[in-house]
Image: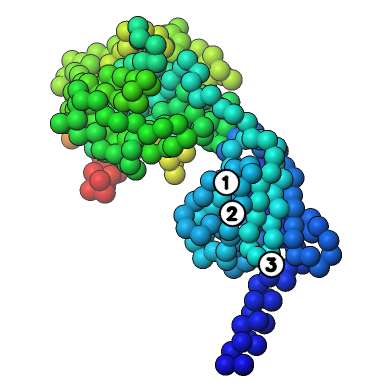
């Protein structure tokens, strides 16, 4: 028993006798970088009592540690809440412990504070002046994935005040075709995308995490949590009107919970073509002479750094800035590795099949230099072919807009008759000959290989 007590004392001494203590967390504590933190000051040498003074402008999360370095180092010497996340406030004392839960943190709202941590008793106190926040700002925003947005503390669908004070409405749609969208609310946005702490006291949402708005929920008042919480609602694809009543802490969703079909039978080119500019209600309508095939001839002037940018939609909005109403109908380019940078159409891409993206908000644009261009869009295969307006599709000898066996037949006939046409110079050497037949066969074989791969 005596031996056990001695070992216990040694272990306790190892835990409590700390030369240094840091606070790690959001700014000003190092932005959760495990190699940095705010070092606390020991009140007297050997006292094992530490203090730190700091000012924060929004809700801030933190833990204590007796060692910096990697996350493994920090988490092996991490002191945190007894269970889950814990809010702390001025004038109170709290108990901490060696924490094996690397997701559990303390959090505190904006203000000027002094924290005093006694490592002998594993208790700390908070003193100072916290800010009193009034979350009623006269505004309301929907945060999350509606109307093509994604989560950002500075981005939200602004709701319109109704006739009754404290009641707000907004028309929204989901842009995910086969998945749920998640959203919550705030009465204030930040200036930058990751400043969640600044708007934490203004946020509110569902009574439980990922609360499903089912079809039977439509038209009913659903309860909302108080300010300072961030549980999200989730909802299936559709077009909705959302009403928030801050007086009664309720939300109502009206509308149609149906998958939006983006195939409208029409297609428009959006962006910097034919003298147009970016607007949700402006687009160059493509011709549809064949089912699923859309064509157009455009002129680009190179308005931005010598290039013009464009993508597509199957529906135009009623107003220039109503992008949310057409997010589910838009599509554009596919880039290598999913890069968001525009797809540059260079000379070697002309006449080849370019991949088109799925429908959804903010599609990647094509980028092309000044000139006249013919576009041929195959809706079914999600392919786009761009050629110079002065030239046909490479290998399209008979000029029917496709490259196939019929072009081989046409080219063989021309070779036998020692004739030529504007599309028969397939290899681009300035004359029509057997080399063009070889080039045409290569194009067809390559096209066949792509089809097998798909």
Q: Which residue is mark 3?
A: 120
Name the N-terminal-most of marks 1 and 2. Answer: 1
**Which of the 4 image quadrants contains residue 162?**
top left
Q: Is residue 181 left or right of residue 185?
A: left
Q: Are marks 1 and 2 in contact (CB under 8 Å)?
A: yes
Residue at image point 69% right, 44% down: 127
Distance of mark 3 from mark 1, alpha carbons? Answer: 20 Å
Q: Residue furthest right?
A: 45
- Relative to 292, say whether 235 is above or below: below
Q: Position of residue 151 (x, y in %)?
A: 44, 34
Q: Which residue is mark 1?
A: 88
Q: Picture coordinates of residue 383 (x, y %)?
A: 29, 31
Tell me the SS state at disc 1: loop
Residue 414 placement: quadrant = top left
What residue lies at 34% left-to-right and 35% top-to-bottom?
206
> For this rendering, which residue is in front, 252 or 32?
252
């Amino acid at each position: 028993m005596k031996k056990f007590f001695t070992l216990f004392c040694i272990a306790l001494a190892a835990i409590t006798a700390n030369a240094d203590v840091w606070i790690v967390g959001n700014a000003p504590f190092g932005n959760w970088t495990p190699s940095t933190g705010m070092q606390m000051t020991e009140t007297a040498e050997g006292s094992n009592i530490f203090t730190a003074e700091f000012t924060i402008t929004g809700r801030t999360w933190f833990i204590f540690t007796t060692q910096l370095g990697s996350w493994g180092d920090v988490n092996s010497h991490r002191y945190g809440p007894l269970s889950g996340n814990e809010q702390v406030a001025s004038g109170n004392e709290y108990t901490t412990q060696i924490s094996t839960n690397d997701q559990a943190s303390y959090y505190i709202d904006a203000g000027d504070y002094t924290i005093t941590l006694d490592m002998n008793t594993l208790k700390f106190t908070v003193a100072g002046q916290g800010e009193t926040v009034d979350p009623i700002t006269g505004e309301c925003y929907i945060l999350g994935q509606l109307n093509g947005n994604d989560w950002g503390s500075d981005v939200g669908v602004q709701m319109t005040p109704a006739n009754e004070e404290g009641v707000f409405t907004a028309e929204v749609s989901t842009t995910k075709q086969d998945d749920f969208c998640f959203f919550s609310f705030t009465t204030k946005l930040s200036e930058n995308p990751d400043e969640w702490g600044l708007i934490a006291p203004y946020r509110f949402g569902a009574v439980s995490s990922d609360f499903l708005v089912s079809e039977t929920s439509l038209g009913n008042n659903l309860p909302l949590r108080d300010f300072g919480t961030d549980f999200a609602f989730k909802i299936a694809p559709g077009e909705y009107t959302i009403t928030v009543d801050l007086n009664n802490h309720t939300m109502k969703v009206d509308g149609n919970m149906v998958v939006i079909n983006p195939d409208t039978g029409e297609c428009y080119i959006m962006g910097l073509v034919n003298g147009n500019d970016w607007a949700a209600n402006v687009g160059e309508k493509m011709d549809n002479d064949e089912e699923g095939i859309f064509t157009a001839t455009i002129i680009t002037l190179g308005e931005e750094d010598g290039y013009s940018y464009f993508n597509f939609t199957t529906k135009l909005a009623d107003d220039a800035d109503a992008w949310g109403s057409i997010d589910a109908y838009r599509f554009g380019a596919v880039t290598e590795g999913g890069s968001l940078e525009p797809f540059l159409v260079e000379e070697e891409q002309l006449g080849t099949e370019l991949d088109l993206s799925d429908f959804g908000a903010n599609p990647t644009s094509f980028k092309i230099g000044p000139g006249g261009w013919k576009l041929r869009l195959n809706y079914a295969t999600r392919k786009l072919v761009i050629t110079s307006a002065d030239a046909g599709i490479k290998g399209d000898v008979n000029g029917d807009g496709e490259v196939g066996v019929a072009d081989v037949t046409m080219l063989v006939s021309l070779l036998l008759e020692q004739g030529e046409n504007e599309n028969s110079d397939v290899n681009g050497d300035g004359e029509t000959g057997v080399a063009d037949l070889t080039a045409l066969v290569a194009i067809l074989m390559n096209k066949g290989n792509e089809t097998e791969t798909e």
